[in-house]
Amino acid sequence: MLASLSIRELILVDKLDLQFEPGLSVLTGETGAGKSILLDALGLAIGVRAESGMVRRGAKKSSVTAMFEPNADHSVWDLLKERDIDCEDCEVVLRRVINEEGRSRAYINEQPVSVSLLRTVGQSLAEIQGQFEQHGLLNTSTHRELLDAYGGTTDLAKMTAVAWNKFLDARSTLQGAEAAIEQAEKEEDFLKHSTEELEKLAPEDGEEQKLVEQRVMLMNVEKVSEAIATASALLTENGSASDKIGEAQRVLDRANEKAPGSFEKAIEALDRVSVELDTAVSELLTVSDSADVAPGLLEEIEDRLYALRDVARKHRVTTDELPKLTRDFRGKLDSISDQGRQLDKLKSDLEKAKSEFSTKADQLSGKRAKAAERLAQGVNKELPELKLDLARLMVSIESVEEDQWSANGKEKVQFLARTNPGANFAPLAKVASGGELSRFLLALKVTLSATSPVPTLVFDEVDSGVGGATAAAIGERLSRLGEDLQVLVITHSPQVAAKGRYHFQVKKSGSDQEVTTSVSELEEQLRLEEIARMISGAEITPEARAAASRLIEAS
């Protein structure tokens, strides 16, 4: 419900803080006192378009803050969680700030948000009938959801939507497979030729790099062989390093016999050098063997490189991508040969998904039709006492063609009305206006109250142009509506005002230079005086007070 509304520097209001409770609250005041400003303020808080003229004269900006306390199971909590908006103390605080140029900033729980998100959240928490008619019951997109809530088919509607999404997935998968196979069939000859060529070539991962390294080696094989021969001769032939090291070892061995221990370290060092020389000679022999290649090997490598690069250029890939390309082409050819069995399975999956959706949607259609009849009967029962004797509501459930099926089912749901017998049923906004429309919407809201997704309702001019028994009937229905929901109503009718659980009076005060609107909650005696004023006018008579007292007692 709406717990509080704070207004700063808005039109005729300088500062106003209001607290609200569950049930029916009425707002009264003389014509021109500024009652509509409260609707403007709440409208701004729930995302209605801001205008520059709303900032109070002399102020640089206006602000409106509305604090709501939704039930724990209200959908707004999931919505805020999806947007990573912090929620504490079971409160949702909507704030709107407007500058002199009419530009505004929006906040939810003090986190900056877009006006669009503020509107989405706000309109899930409060609905204003009579001013902001672009949403709520006049918005046909809400009718299906309202009917499902009224008829208890919300869960079935969700299951129908799930079945529809599975059908879409199955259809998309089949269409993708058909398109892929159709394209593959167009390329079948090319695929066969290319696959044969690639599989015959049999490219390997990283093959080009290996071949390039071998080619570099072979292209320099003469220089490599010459270097090996020279190095080997220096190490092994007469007068080589090996011979000189051996001679040095023998000299030192003889000397060590005459001076034991004096040359041991030098002898050990020469031993290590001798071992390293032997290792070097062995490595040179190994390299020499590898450099001794078969005649024509360089030409074979050149031909292989040319073949790999030529095929890669033909398919506009690198040589490293050729192995994968070979596998892809083979997979496409295999899919063509297996296309019949694959498509049969996907078609079967699609028919199964369509059947499951159709079953759920048909069940939903049947339940919606019964709920629509009950809803229309309930609303039409309310209309006569609201001075709409000849008016009728019809809940239209129109079946659509298969190409228009959707997650919502197989039909369009719309609330239609007529105000006179013989007239055609038409959308609500086109058959009534002003107070007549408000009363029509009141009858709908009373009938839907137990399942309304919006916890706070605000009515303006719902009693316009009526009085007596009709006004009393309106007040009685607003009171009933307040048993399930929080209801705020701006009224000029004493019969309606007397039904309120809480009563607020709107006053305008000040001079010609500066006028201010204020709001105060009325206690018992002041409330009686206000209702008496509404009965008799400016001069409150004893008879008016007595009549006001009877109205309050009857309520």
Image (tube, rainbow, N blue to C red):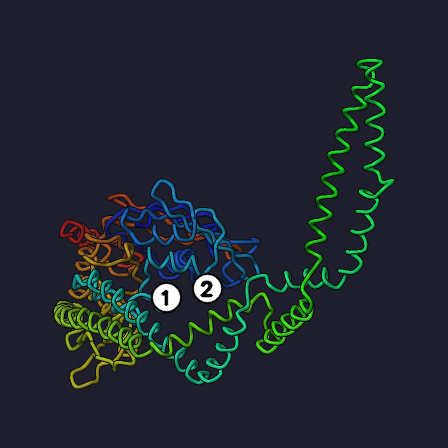
| Separation (CA) of disc 2 from disc 1 | 10 Å
Q: Is residue 383 visible?
A: no
Q: Which of the pair 31/458 is nearer the observer?
A: 458
Q: Which of the pair 54/274 is nearer the observer?
A: 274
Query: Dot 2: what SS?
Result: loop
Residue shown at 42% from the left, 54% from the top:
508
Residue 379: where, in percent of width, then height?
16, 68
Residue 440: where, in percent of width, then height?
22, 70
Q: Residues within 10 Å of mark 1 (few under 14, many from 20)?
A: some
At label 2, the amino acid type is: Arg
Q: Is residue 36 visible?
A: yes
Q: Which of the pair 457/504 is nearer the observer?
A: 457
**Vertical relation: 526 (above or below) 115:** above
> Would you say 140 lies left or right of 396 here?
right
- Rendered image: mark on residue 49: 2
Residue 345: where, in percent of width, then height?
27, 73
**Vertical relation: 486 (above or below) 333:** above
Q: Tags 2 and 1 in contact by the CB under 8 Å rule?
A: no
Residue 228: where, in percent of width, then height?
78, 51
At label 1, the amino acid type is: Phe
Query: Dot 1: what SS?
Result: loop
Residue shown at 76% from the left, 33% from the top:
274
- Rendered image: mark on residue 132: 1
Q: Which of the pair 202/441 is nearer the observer?
A: 202
Q: Residues within 10 Å of mark 2 (few under 14, many from 20)?
A: some
